[in-house]
Amino acid sequence: MEKRQLGRSGLEVSAIGLGCMGMSAAYGAAMDRKEAITLIRSAVDRGITFFDTAEVYGPYANEELVGEALRPVREQVVIATKFGFDIENSAGFARKPISQPAHIRKVIEGSLKRLQTDYIDLYYQHRVDPDTPIEDVAGTIKDFIDEGKVRHFGLSEAGAATIRRAHAVQPLAALQSEYSLWFRDREKDILPLLEELGIGFVPFAPLGKGFLTGKVDTAQTFGDDDFRSKQPRFSAENRAANQVFVDVINGVATSKNATAAQVALAWLLAQKPWIVPIPGTTKLHRVEENIGATTLELNADDLAQIEAGLAGIRPQGDRYPPANAAMAGR
Ligand SMILES: NC(=O)c1ccc[n+]([C@@H]2O[C@H](COP(=O)([O-])OP(=O)(O)OC[C@H]3O[C@@H](n4cnc5c(N)ncnc54)[C@H](OP(=O)(O)O)[C@@H]3O)[C@@H](O)[C@H]2O)c1
């Protein structure tokens, strides 16, 4: 598979990574562990070298799964994980950010153990902690890099000022934030900044949590353990209103003999050469389908068709409940 560089960090990864969260959390019941291990190893066989997890997924179970699955190929892959939620004292969408240096020093040891490794390739702060100066966080990661425990530093859903301050202390390899055809807010202030500073961008939820693939319709119901049941954008009413995104994507997919998922991912890849989406799936055939996006070239006409089809259309419904939404962009 095509490889991409995350900004000017020197970190090279497959053009599409694999988001592992949904194998253990957020989308209903966890996968059977053996099947999940087989899935991750099959993704490696098909050329994926970039795997995304976090201590909070599960919590802990997803890091354990990723660690076990990738142990035989540890040196050939890039493992990205995240710290920064107070897992012991808060839960669900009400999870509190926490990033005091003493806390990070403690939790990194747990992540290393669960991942069965002595280094983390890319260590992200999951959400900015307003009570801890970002310089303290960046300084702690710098120490980890000096100690050989971490190779690269990342932030998730951070705002422009925070990115600049962190980068001045310890250069960032990547920002991981939501970005897709139905969430483009980061294009205005964040993408130009990343380009200026030479920081890679890892869009999470690149398929709009499944919606942009056209496989989620208004008839689908979500269980309590599926985080989409609490996301306003996924109410049945908003799904009906947002169908226009799927229709526009499908229009291009049909003309390219591709699937909607492939067009949604190829659109992201076409934005910048330092963008690496991490679609999540629990199914091998979809891993293969999503990899197919790396060879789907959207030309200027295709991109213009998407822009024209979605011009002036805003997605209906917030992506998160209010308390959670407030954590983004700090
Ligand atoms: N930094 C953060 O705060 C943050 C937040 C959320 C997620 N993430 C990371 O980003 C990764 C990706 O985000 P995400 O998993 O939430 O959203 P996503 O990748 O946009 O969508 C995942 C959903 O799409 C479905 N899907 C995947 N490929 C498909 C295809 N080809 N056709 C039809 N449906 C398809 C999956 O269902 P099946 O399993 O049934 O295929 C799943 O329901 C996560 O795994 C996680 O590692 C990070």
Image (spheres, rainbow, N blue to C red):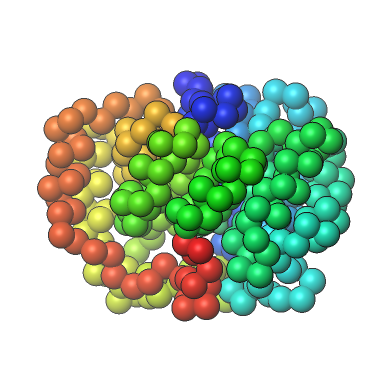
Residue at 21% across / 28% down in the picture?
Answer: 299
Of residue 171 and residue 33, the one placed in the foreground of this image is 171
The x and y percentages for residue 84 are 69, 60
- The answer to whether 233 is drawn above or below residue 70 in the figure is below
- The answer to whether 309 is drawn above or below residue 44 in the figure is below
The x and y percentages for residue 222 are 49, 71
Residue at 20% across / 50% down in the picture?
Answer: 248
**Left or right: where 263 falls relative to 227:** left
Residue at 66% across / 36% down in the picture?
Answer: 152
Residue 60 figure quarter: bottom right
Residue 289 figure quarter: top left
**Left or right: where 113 falls relative to 41:** right
Does the image show residue 166?
A: yes
Residue at 75% across / 48% down in the picture?
Answer: 140
**Left or right: where 297 falls relative to 101:** left
Of residue 82 and residue 136, the one placed in the foreground of this image is 136
Does the image show residue 46?
A: no
The x and y percentages for residue 5 are 51, 26
The x and y percentages for residue 255 are 18, 34
Of residue 138 and residue 121, the one placed in the foreground of this image is 138
- The answer to whether 184 is drawn above or below residue 232 in the figure is above
Residue 131 figure quarter: bottom right
Disc tally is 0
Of residue 67 and residue 202, the one placed in the foreground of this image is 202
**Left or right: where 218 falls relative to 15:** left
